[in-house]
Structures are given as structure tokens and as C-alpha cells.
Amino acid sequence: MNLVRLERLVKRYGDLMALDHMELDIRAGEILGLLGPNGAGKTTLIHALTGLIAVDSGTIELFGHAMRPGKLEPKRHFGLVTQELTLFYDLTARENLAFFGGIYGLKGKALQKRVERTLQLVGLEERADQFPGKFSGGMQRRLNIAAALVHEPRLLIMDEPTVGIDPQSRSYILDTVRELNRQGTTVLYTTHYMEEVQALASRIVIMDDGHAIANGTVDELIARIQLEEKLQMEVSEPTEQLIEQLQAIGGVKQVKQEGRRLLVSIRPGADVLEPLLAAARTYGGGVRYVNADKPTLEDIFLTLTGKQLRDGDGGEAE
Amino acid sequence: MSVAGMMRYALLRMARSYLALLLLVGVPLVLIAVIGTVSDYLQIERYGDTSLPGMDYLAVSMVLGFQLFGGAYTMEFFKSDLLDARKWRLHALPLRIDRYGMALLLGSTVFTMLQGLAMAIFTQLMFGVNWGNYAWLVVVLAAVSFLSQLVGLVLILSLRSAKLAERLSEVYGIGSMLLAGFALPMPDTPLFEFFGRYGNPLSLGQNAVFGMLYGNDRLLPLLSVGLLFTASALLLPLAAAAGRRKLG
């Protein structure tokens, strides 16, 4: 079942086409990782999805309701975690959550209960009556997430939620996202940290130039893109004859030598490990070390967009 | 959440804005204490042949004068919540932004009024300043404060630069004090006489308080408060239009 459906979204800023017939579905129960280089249109997409901006054409459907700026009903069902901390620094952690919960119509004991439960979920129950300004960066991030969770939304939209925090807090946040998902919350997760998406997402959408250019699980994307695999091998005597023998093996695309280390590019799906090792033993004086690298999400991203994801970690300028 | 509920959080936040409290409550009280102690022997002539103690004139003028800077609350809260850092977050909530804006505007008005009232009570207890009827004083404070909030609101919603809006709101406050002849004597011309009496919010506030205390009839104080509310009524549609344009 789709919670969100975006169809042929177009948004222009002057000559810039920020969204170019963008299509996206978010299915109930999944963690959807949204990746894209700076300027790909991710932030514009989330602004449109959350009703901050109007699109020029196309439709946005959230939980069966058409979404456009000013429409309140669809907003009751999602929580938004922005990249910037949007806490009230002159309210305590508990008061922050009570404010956000109150906006969603929670009151009295029900509100109190939700606030306590959410503080517990993000591990801030002992700091509930302190002001966020006294918190570490990681704790502020956790409270920022809690503010989006207090009404127990069906969909959690997270825009770069772990920017600039320590590894321990990041790990805590990722565990929290997994736990929420296990409890049934659907998550849309955008980040510059590829390893987070790889660790969390059940499905990935890669955006570039305002539209989706790939959509699937990591394994599906690898299979679809047919990335070459790479093997590193260190031999005792890297002779010319050895390199010629390796290059003659069917499925081997290229062999590069760096001292005693050989970098072998292999066509996708080619089963060449045994012949490579045999040649190395016969013509290279024995194998000292072998390491095979499977293609990563980073490789997929680079292949599809031609860009590094972390070009300028500062976020998008759209 | 109701407007009153949102106002409650706004008031809580304002009560914790310690720098603003220092500037808008601490500074005037210190000025009243220092200048008032020096000038209390003076008798200020006002309202025909009625003279009033220097301390009373100073305290009333200072408390009403600092109400003019209370618009800083509205400007700061609109800026931080609806124009800058929290803009996207609050727009993504199932929240009518006009109602939230109303809560901020009313919260700032009430908070500034409470500051004025606290200062009035303090000066009465400490220096024996005669404020007259406190219910009337609340009406006067409400009139001056609401107008000042609206001036701040129109500026922050109309201008691109928040810094410029803040500076202009200060010009409004300081300019009104100058026009009222509070800080410096103004030229003795009909134009300055008119603006010194009816053309600025501080004079209107002074008329409302002193007129009720020492005036021969109630026309002038009622007219003054009426003019303050009329000015607010004229600014309201401007603020609404600017809000629709800037906040969507």
C-alpha cells in the first residue's frame, strides 16, 4: 500500500527546473533512502511533499489526501525532522515536546504520556526539564527527532538528521529509526552519508537533475547497473608473464600493477577467482593477500550521477 | 491547539528572554530611579496650570516610552518562528499560520503590558508615583503596546531585511519620545505642538494617563486612547496583507 504518491511533479525556479516530472511512491512499512548530489532536487521535493511550496504541475497524494500549501489534514499523519535544529531553546525538552504534541491536538494526560514515552525513546528522560541549549549536539538532534515523533506519525520524513554529530549519537539515532520502523513507522530518509542509507534503507531512490534516475534495493541496483567487481591481490614476484596470463583469463577486463599489488577489474558475474589464484601461484611465486570488493552504493551513485555524494557536505543550494 | 494555548508557550518563552527583560524592564527602572531621584524636586507644568511631581512625569513617560520598544518581541518571534530557522518546521505542522501569528502578536501585547504594569506597581511602591486608576492604566498600556506590536509586525513582514526592520522600529520608539518632547524640548511651532500632543503614541499615552489624573474633562484621555486604537485598526489590514504575501 502506498502512503505517498508523487506523479509528474514539476517545479521551476526561473530557468532552473528543480523538479522535472519527478515520480515517487512511498510504501507502508519501508525505509526509503533518498539520495542525490547537491542540487539534485531532494530538498525541493521534501518542501513540496510537506506543503511548504506549491508545485507548478503534477500531483502529490499523502494518505489519500491531495497535498498543497495550506492544507492541514495530510500534515497530521507525518512527522518532519529537518536538517537544521528547530527546537525552542527557551523551552525545556519536555515543554518542546508538549508544544509539538499540542499542535497535533494531544491534550492532558494523553499528551503527558506521549511526551514521556517519546523522551524515553530518544533517551532523554533524565534531561526532560533542561533547556536544549545545555545539551550536546547529539542530544539536541535526538530531541529534534523526538519533536517529530511525539504524535506517533505513520510517516517520518528525515532530512539529513545526523549532520555534524558524534558517532555514538549517530548510532543511537540509526537504532531509533530501525526500532520505529520495526514498530510500523514508514520512513523517508535523505542523507549525504551513503553508509547510513546502505545500513537502513529497504529501498533506495537516487535523484539527479530533478527526477529519479534509479529505484530499488541495493542488490537490485547493483544487478541492474552491472558494475564491474574489483579484486586486489599481492603476489611474491609480480612478473610480466603473470600479468599477461591474468589478462588472458576470460572475464578479466584489466590488470594494473602497483608494486607487488595487482588490481584486477572483473566483468560482472564472471567466475574467475580460481583461475586467478592458480595463475598467481604458477607465475607469481605465490599469493600473499587477496581482497575482493563488491560494488558499493557509492559506486552505484558515482556510476549513475557521475558525482560524489559528499561534494560539499553543507547541503543543497536549491 | 487553541490560540490561547499557543499564547501560553509564547509568554513562557518571553518570560525567559532575560536580555529583553533587562533592556525593557531593568533599564527603564534604573533610569527612573537615577533621574527621578535627581529631578524629583522639579514640578512639571502640564494640563493648564496643573503641576505634577517630576518623578511622576518621568515614571509615566518612561514606562509608556518603553512600551514603544515592546514590538521587538513580535518582530523577534515572527522572525525566528515564521521567517527564519523554524519556518519550514512550523509550516509542516497541521497549524494555521495566521492563528499562530495571532498568538505571537497577542502574546507579545500581553507580555509588554504586564511589563508596564509591573513597572507601574514598582514605581508606586518605591517612589510613590501616582498612576491613578489601574484598570484605566491597563487600557492605556494595551493601546500603546498593541500599536507598537503592529508597527513591528508591519515592518518585519514588509521589509526584506530584518535588520532594517529592527532599526526602523527603534526609530519609531526614539522618534516618538523625541516628538513628545520627553528627551529634548521641541520647537514651539503649531506643527510640533500638534505632533507633540496628538501625533505620536507616547504623547497619546501620556494624555490618557495624565488627562485622567489632572485634566478638567475626560475627552482628551478618551480621545487619545481612541486614536491609539484607531491607528492599530488602520495597521491591522496592512499587517494582514503583508502576512499573506510573506507567510503564504
Image (spheres, coloured by chain):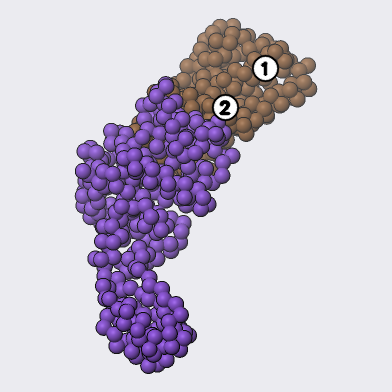
Q: Is A257 left or right of A46, judged from the image as shown?
A: right
Given residues A206 and A117, the one toward you in this image is A117
- Disc ID at residue A235: none
Given residues A72 and B75, the one toward you in this image is A72
Q: Residue A81's quadrant in the figure?
A: top left
**Residue for badge 1:** B122
- Can you give x and y, in whole percent of width and height, for residue B31 in the image? 71, 26
- Can you give x and y, in whole percent of width and height, for residue A6 in the image? 23, 48
Q: Is disc 1 placed on a helix, strand or loop?
A: helix
Q: Are both tags, 1 and 2, on one chain? A: yes
Q: Pinpoint the chain carrying mark 1.
A: B
Display colour for chain B: brown
Answer above or below: position of B99 versus A181: above
Q: Pinpoint the chain carrying mark 2.
A: B
Under mark 2, the amino acid is Ala
Given residues B171 and A85, the one toward you in this image is A85
> Which residue is painted at 38% across and 72% down in the image?
A292
* Chain that is coloured purple in the picture: A
Residue A70 visible in the shown view: no
Q: Is disc 2 placed on a helix, strand or loop?
A: helix
Near mark 2 (Cα within 10 A), the count class, few <14, some 14-19 or many ≥20, is some
Q: CA distance from mark 1 to mark 2?
A: 18 Å
Under mark 1, the amino acid is Phe
Answer above or below: position of B188 versus A45: above
Location of the C terminus of chain A by quadrant is bottom left
**Residue for badge 2:** B15
- Can you give x and y, in whole percent of width and height, for residue B29 in the image? 69, 24
Residue B96 visible in the shown view: yes
